[in-house]
Amino acid sequence: MPKFLIQASYTTEGTKGLLKEGASGRREAVEQVVGGLGGRIESMYFAFGEDDLVMIVDFPDSVSMAAVSLTVKASGTVRTRATPLVTLDEIDEAVRREVTFRAAGA
């Protein structure tokens, strides 16, 4: 299953919800959303700084990740970034593929 790094920061309203529910309440909500589309949470951490939450999740496909991303962003309570993660084996496979490319101006 494809893996994604999710980085999120709560809005003021989202932070109020976190204070009310606690971290375990948010994890349950995330597990429902991710599990509902056939995915799973590999790891989930709260953080300080620009990001309030960092997760690694598995989804069956990119469309499932996009569906979750759109729905969560539409709530207005959290801003998210999703980064596809590539395994070492996938990079090794990419290195073996021949790609023809002409640089701009060359």
Image (tube, rainbow, N blue to C red):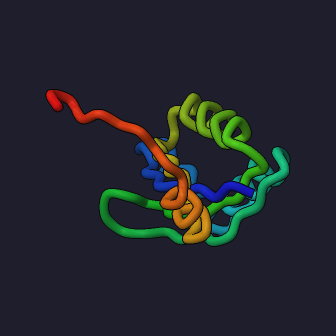
**Image quadrant of residue 102?**
top left
The one nearer the camera, 83 or 29, is 83
Relative vertical location of residue 88 with respect to residue 63 in this rendering, above or below? below
Relative vertical location of residue 74 with respect to residue 6 in this rendering, above or below? above
**Image quadrant of residue 2?**
bottom right
Is residue 61 left or right of 97 when viewed as pictured? right
Relative vertical location of residue 14 with respect to residue 50 in this rendering, above or below? above
Is residue 81 left or right of 59 when viewed as pictured? left
Question: Taking the image as drawn, is residue 19 in sight?
Answer: no
Is residue 31 left or right of 26 when viewed as pictured? right
- The image position of residue 33, as x and y in percent, is 76, 47
- The image position of residue 90, as x and y in percent, is 60, 62
Question: Taking the image as drawn, is residue 69 in sight?
Answer: yes
Please identify the quadrant where the C terminus is shown.
top left
Please identify the quadrant where the N terminus is shown.
bottom right
The one nearer the camera, 41 or 72, is 41
The one nearer the camera, 24 or 36, is 36
Residue lying at the far left of the rendered structure: 105
Q: Residue at x 68, y 63 (%)?
A: 27
Tally of numbered tags: 0
**Image quadrant of residue 50?**
bottom left
Q: Residue at x 42, y 43 (%)?
A: 11
- The image position of residue 51, as x and y in percent, is 39, 58
Relative vertical location of residue 39 with respect to residue 43 in this rendering, above or below? above
The one nearer the camera, 100 or 5, is 100
- The image position of residue 68, as x and y in percent, is 67, 39
